[in-house]
Amino acid sequence: MSKRPMKLIGTSIYTDSVAPGFCDVFEAVPRTDASDYIDQLVALLRKHRVDVAFPGIDADMYKWADHVAELKATGTKVVLNSRALISMCSDKWAFYERQRELMPTYAIPSYLDMDFDALKANCGLPFLLKPRRGFGSKGIVVVETAEQLAKIAPATKTTLMAQPIVGRDDDEFTVSAFCDGQGGYSASMALQRRLSKDGFTEKAEVVDQAEFSEAVRDLCKAFSPIGPTNFQFRKTDAGLKLLEINPRISSSTSIRAAFGYNEALMAVDMAIEQRLPVQPDIKRGRAVRYTEDFIFHDNSVHL
């Protein structure tokens, strides 16, 4: 991978964010849903003559995908996945319907009908209610009784989809692949993970990516992702089941980089040199996330 010198421009909507401690230049930006967000982002890209830009969160990714021509007009190369895949992944039900058509093998049965008896028959008890639009495990409800379902407002039910609980919590895996946009991929890494209460990876252990290669290959053929793409799986008695595809750099990218899979540098190389990565050597080990103090002195930064 590239050894070129780099200058990192970081952004946040919070002026008191820890972000300045992890980048060379920090810029506060409006919320993604603000009317002037794109104008401010374009100005920032021009101001710093940014070569390559990455969306850091889902909200940014969806907004950038809608305005990609404006961003590219600055001369910046924007790391975005397939527009079609980004659009599908913004609505879990739309993605499920497409998955049933293209690659049903890994699909988890999903339902919009909020009738308790029907869901009990189809999903068993307990079952899950998931927001059709959301990220991580935020908003997911485990339903055990009809009374629990009845307490959910009708308007809220229209934003949800139901699924059976598949596999076990300790059989969840996150697989990142660097995809070529032609139905293939050139590098990948797999982690077995435990989630925090907020739905993000709290503990992770490197596992052999070979056992996921067939599933990732099948899904790449079906959806033709481009660049860094994250696949979330659970192991079940019926084989691997896909929880979701995140069409962006993994939120576990710092963990992956520590074990030899630096998808950010891979994406820079692809953006600047049009060069796909080769499979790196992955170190074995485990990672634990924890809270740490970052101290900003008035005259310096101290970690």
Image (cartoon, grey):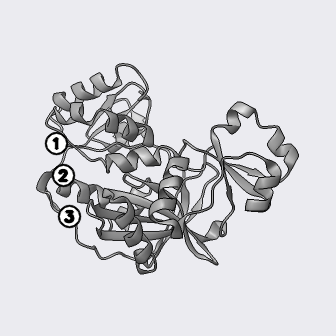
Q: Is residue 49 visible?
A: yes
Residue 294 position by quadrant: top left
| Pointer 3 residue | 276
| Pointer 2 residue | 271
Mark 2–mark 1 Cα distance, whole angstroms, equals 9 Å
Which comes sooner in the sequence, label 2 or label 3? 2
Mark 3–mark 1 Cα distance, whole angstroms, equals 18 Å
Task: Between residue 58 and residue 67, name the one nearer to us.
Answer: 67
Q: Residue at x 86, y 48 (%)?
A: 146
Which amino acid, by three-letter code, is at mark 1?
A: Asp
Q: Which mark is residue 79?
A: none
Is disc 2 in contact with disc 1, using a CB cutoff of under 8 Å? yes
In this view, 186 is above or below 150? below
Q: x, y (%) of residue 240? A: 54, 73
Which comes sooner in the sequence, label 3 or label 1? 1
Q: Is residue 183 left or right of residue 146?
A: left
Q: Which mark is residue 51?
A: 1
